[in-house]
Amino acid sequence: MTAGQRHLLVDGYNVLHQWPRGKAFLRRGQLAAARDYLAAEVRVLHDREGLRVTLVFDGKGEKVELERPYEDLTFSFLYSPSGLSADAVIEQLVSGAGDPSQCLVITQDSLERETLQVAGATVMSPEDLAAWVRQAEGRLAGELQKRRQESHEWWRDIK
């Protein structure tokens, strides 16, 4: 993480259980599709807002597992080992951060929210995350429209 870069930590399954489409994937047992859906939703925050993003999920293995769905070093899936919850992994990441105030955690779990706020992290709800994603998408769409207009005007002027 570069100095001053905010780190978005998402309690993956917790958020998916709060979002209707995510909940539908989980009900059907489509865990990989649910994770991919969540990654696609928050990618705009990584790409446009310049956040490091880690989606943390409860795992089944013997050790922490890391995946990079977009082959980008600053966007990861992190799976907890079987004896440790995603919440515990997030707590460790926040407490181990050089500046916990640069950590932004998304979870609905009220006890986890309290623990992380005391540790210095900013905490948001899954609903707040959804609204933020929509706002970032809107800003990105506006920027693209402006670029298209500028390009159109430039080409019109050189004719």
Image (tube, rainbow, N blue to C red):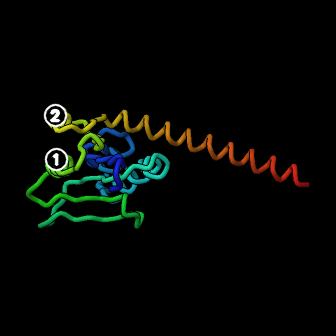
Res 146 → quadrant: top right
Residue at horizontal 14 percent and vertical 49 percent from the top:
88
Q: Residue at x 31, y 38 (%)?
A: 18
Q: Which one is in front, 19 or 134?
A: 134
Image position, residue 122 (x, y; %): 27, 36
Quadrant for residue 77, please give it: bottom left
Q: Please, what secondary structure does the residue beneath circle 1 have? A: helix
- Residue that protrudes farthest toward the front in the picture: 3
Q: Give the numbered dot on residue 120.
A: none
Camera-side residue of 70 and 91: 91
Q: Which residue is mark 2?
A: 118
Q: Amino acid at mark 1?
A: Ser
Q: Quadrant of residue 72?
A: bottom left
Residue topped by disc 1: 95
In the figure, 63 relative to 55: above or below? below
Q: Nearer the viewer, residue 51 or 33?
A: 51
Expressed as whole percent of the image width and height from the top left, the position of residue 141 reads: 60, 43
Q: For mark 2, does the 10 Å Cα neighbourhood hold few (<14), some (14 to 19), or many (20 or more) residues?
A: few
